[in-house]
Amino acid sequence: MEVKYLKKFRQIVEKMKKGKEGYLFIAPSFIIFMIFTLFPIVKSLIISLFEYDLSSYKWIGINNYLVLIEDKVFLKALINSFLFALFNVPLTIILSLFISITIHPKKEASKSFYRAAFYLPVVSSIVTITLIWKWIYHPIFGILNFIIENIGFNRINWLGDYDFAFPALVIVLLTISIGQPILLYVASLGSIPKTYYEVGRIEGVNRLQEYRYITWPLLKPTTLYILVMTTIASFQTFAIVQLMTGGGPFYTTSTIVYQLYTTAFDFVKLGLASAMGIILTLIIVLISVFQFKFLSTDIEY
């Protein structure tokens, strides 16, 4: 038995020797991943098993997780995080695909302008974008209420009303989310061979059938990437919540990341905050694995 395992070990070492140049190339990224991603996750997992407040710590096992299961505020934040993803992800894919298909046939100069315009919120400061939207939503001086009043409706307290605060933040998140998908879709549309469309026209397919049977299937790899990345970003929603609503009103807009932040830095309950982080990590990993397993495709062109 020992000889068998020793042989396998030697085979692994030989393979590593053959690809040593490749390992050297990935070493910097792997080291950064280990230091700034894997180590913090492991450290958070350890801290989540303690009652930890900087000055003292006490082993409590899985008690932090049991507390979170019964915490109504955390459960509300968990539901809100799922809702952010549920609304933002499909809307981002649909809108970015529609916009990309619209601007793709245009001249290169026009395409460059639109790509830059839609990508601008992505590279801009999230604080700046949030403050602009906060002024738009302002209950007295906001341009949105100005328009509403001029068409005969009453003003709305967009960020303070229980019914409107969450949809208002979804719109802000959407404006930040669609920039990169538009760039990716436009690039993918440009890389689809024109021969597929020519064959389709010979076969007599109309424009709708062209998008359904040619464009959409060939965009599936890009769509999968956008789906996974947008889902992760939606679950990590924090800045717009902190700057615009503070989780209110009545925790309507609170998310897991926002609750994690307040628990760690306002109440200094680092063990409980770490448990929230581990739960969020598990949710994202499980959803990502599910998406890759059931939505991945072997299409190449």
Image (cartoon, rainbow, N blue to C red):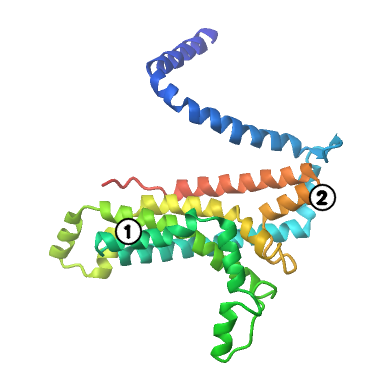
Residue drawn at (63%, 32%) of the image: 39
The quarter of the picture where the N terminus appears is top right
Mark 1, other Cα within 10 Å: few <14 / some 14–19 / many ≥20: few
Q: Is residue 289 above or below residue 43?
A: below
> Residue 217 in the image: x percent, y percent?
32, 56
Q: Which mark is residue 240?
A: none
Residue drawn at (37%, 55%) of the image: 183
Mark 2, other Cα within 10 Å: few <14 / some 14–19 / many ≥20: few
User: Is label 2 or label 1 in front?
Assistant: 1
Q: On the image, which quarter does residue 300 sit in?
A: top left
Q: Is residue 7 above or below residue 158?
A: above
Residue that badge 1 annotates: 112
> Residue 29 in the image: x percent, y percent?
49, 31
> Residue 205 in the image: x percent, y percent?
20, 67
Residue 218 visible from this viewpoint: no
Residue 223 visible from this viewpoint: yes
